[in-house]
Image (cartoon, rainbow, N blue to C red):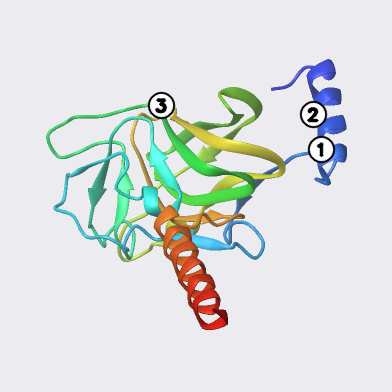
Amino acid sequence: MRSGLFATALALGAVGSGLPASAAPVINNTGISAPAETITFSEFTFATGTPITNQFASLGVTFSSSLYYDVQPEFFPTDFLANFDLNGDMSNPDSIMFASDQTAAAFAMQTNSGTSTFTALLNGTPVESFNASTDDSFLPDLSNASNFYGFSGILFNQIEITSGTTFFQIDNLQLSNTVHEPATFALLGSGLLGLGLFRRKRAQ
């Protein structure tokens, strides 16, 4: 948790950036308010157990060490990522890195019953952290599959997840700011350039 001096510095920085003066941890059943984008991990399909690092980079997120693609509807209704595979490989803690700075982000998460730690970082520097009780669920009761954790009211581009029970699974990653794939801008730029040349040619 933050010291008083660190908290004051964060509050001043938040005021200057137009953010709320105090950060708020997200611990609820809906996530952040009006997310600009939600990544369900169903956008791309992989074999169960595939290590995931940069495969979702076009959507604005990468992972510091391998999470593993999984499809087990008894835990989450749709595809999700876990920090372990069926061979016993595991990473803990793990980080979600965002290609653009976020003012809020959250994700559904399940663990074995226990306490997990969530840390928001900006360019590698911790700016906020909190602990929360986390739990799991499985068919026929998937109520804990909608337990969301994250941050709002601060600027950050990374969230580190540390499960006190070792294992965790995440789904439905919500972002406050979208990331447009560079290729989109390249196509737009070439289109505008072509239009400019066409107009110049007609003027001659």
Locate residue 174, reporting x and y percent: 53, 56
Mark 2: which amino acid?
Leu
Which of the two labelled residues, at mark 2 and mark 3, occupies the earlier sequence position?
A: 2
Along the line of sight, the residue nearer the viewer: 204 or 149? 204
Disc 2 target residue: 10
- Determine whether 101 is above or below 187 in the image: above
Q: Disc 1 designates what residue? A: 14
Q: Is residue 69 visible?
A: yes
Crowd rating for badge 1 (residues with CA inside 10 Å; few <14, some 14–19, many 20+): some
Q: Determine which of the numbered discs, if any, sits on residue 93 in the image.
A: 3
Please determine whether, in this image, residue 4 is positioned above or below residue 135.
Answer: above
Mark 3 is surrounded, within 10 Å at the Cα level, by few (under 14), some (14 to 19) or many (20 or more) other residues, namely some
Q: CA distance from mark 1 to mark 3?
A: 27 Å
Label 1 or label 3, whichever comes before in sequence order = 1
Task: Inspect the image, locate mark 1, and give the three-letter code of the amino acid beneath it.
Answer: Ala
Residue 165 image point, x, y percent = 39, 30
Residue at mark 2 to residue at mark 3: CA–CA distance: 25 Å
Q: Name the residue at 32% across, 66% down.
A: 140
Mark 2, other Cα within 10 Å: few <14 / some 14–19 / many ≥20: many
Residue 125 picture location, percent across and down? 61, 22
State if disc 3 and disc 2 touch (CB < 8 Å): no
* Left or right of residue 30, residue 155 in this image: right
Q: Secondary structure at mark 2?
A: helix
